[in-house]
């Protein structure tokens, strides 16, 4: 684990992505290189194809504090409480929209698209703000998400061993959107929900 016993969210999230690609999509030749002078946070080689991977936490510390205050007042609040699904999706859409905009700008400013055509946006829901199904629905109202090759969601639970960085915890995850047909259909079981097949959005954003 990283200094002061703090979880390295980038290492947690990229392991979630890599293990998904291995276990659910059947890829075995996957190489991960952490970029010291980010962006991107990582370079990922999958069966010889190169991807830039940029990670971000979906909910800020301020957002989590606000949810905690709402809970104390008896208000519903996301996966941390029993907030109405529509409200969760609206708030997730705002958070994902910000991530899409800021991460694209960051990658373009560094000239990453000129060096690597395909980028993966890696969203880490460290605080259990919403579940993957809420996030998938929220993504459909986000503008410009399809600039990225794929958008991956690393959930806050359930827990599992971290294969890439054993000193860090492991997380489950799934794709919210991808241009890769092989990655699109999954059997997703979110906490508290029944397993079912989920398809990443096929339509481009507006």
Image (cartoon, rainbow, N blue to C red):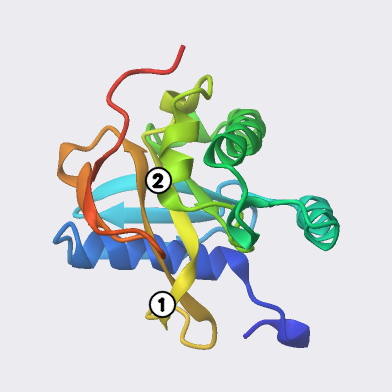
Q: Is residue 130 visible?
A: yes
Where residue 126 sits in the image (x, y, percent)? 61, 63
Q: Is residue 107 visible?
A: no
Q: Quadrant of the N terminus?
A: bottom right
Q: Is residue 147 above or below residue 60?
A: above
What number of labels is visible? 2
Per the image, the residue denoted by label 2 is: 133
Foreground pick, 131 / 185: 131
* Left or right of residue 89: residue 20: left
Considering the numbered disc 2 on the image, is that residue within a helix, a strand or a loop? helix
Q: Spatial distance from mark 1 to mark 2, Cα to Cα?
A: 26 Å
Where residue 21 sits in the image (x, y, percent)? 26, 59
Foreground pick, 143 / 188: 188
Residue at coordinates 25% horizontally, 54% vertically from top-left? Answer: 46
The nearer-to-camera label among 1 and 2 is 2
Query: Alpha-carbon neighbours of circle 2 within 10 Å: few (<14), some, or many (≥20)?
Result: some
Where residue 129 sits in the image (x, y, percent)? 61, 54
Residue 19's tag is none
Per the image, the residue denoted by label 1 is: 164
Residue at coordinates 55% horizontally, 58% vertically from top-left? Answer: 35
Foreground pick, 40 / 136: 136
Where residue 188 sits in the image (x, y, percent)? 27, 56
Q: Hey, which quadrant is residue 173 in on the image?
A: bottom left
* Left or right of residue 96: residue 69: right
Q: Earlier in the sequence, mark 1 or mark 2?
A: 2
* Left or right of residue 178: residue 133: right
Residue at coordinates 59% horizontally, 28% vertically from top-left? Answer: 108
Residue at coordinates 62% horizontally, 48% vertically from top-left? Answer: 83
Q: Is residue 59 above or below residue 120?
A: below
Query: Alpha-carbon neighbours of circle 1 within 10 Å: few (<14), some, or many (≥20)?
Result: some
């Amino acid at each position: 684990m990283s200094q002061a016993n703090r979880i390295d969210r980038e290492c947690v999230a990229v392991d979630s992505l890599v293990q998904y690609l291995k276990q659910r999509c059947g890829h075995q030749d996957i190489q991960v290189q952490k970029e010291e002078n980010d962006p991107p946070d990582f370079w990922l080689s999958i069966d010889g194809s190169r991807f830039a991977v940029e990670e971000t936490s979906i909910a800020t510390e301020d957002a989590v504090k606000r949810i905690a205050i709402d809970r104390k007042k008896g208000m519903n609040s996301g996966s941390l409480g029993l907030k109405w699904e529509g409200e969760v999706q609206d708030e997730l859409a705002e958070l994902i929209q910000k991530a899409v905009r800021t991460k694209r700008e960051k990658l373009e400013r560094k000239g990453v698209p000129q060096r690597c055509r395909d980028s993966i946006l890696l969203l880490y829901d460290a605080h259990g703000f919403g579940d993957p199904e809420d996030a998938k629905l929220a993504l459909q109202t986000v503008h410009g998400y399809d600039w990225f090759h794929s958008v991956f969601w690393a959930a806050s639970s359930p827990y599992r061993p971290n294969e890439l960085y054993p000193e860090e915890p492991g997380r489950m995850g799934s794709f919210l959107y991808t241009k890769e047909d092989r990655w699109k259909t999954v059997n997703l079981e979110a906490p508290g929900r029944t397993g079912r097949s989920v398809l990443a959005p096929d339509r481009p954003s507006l």
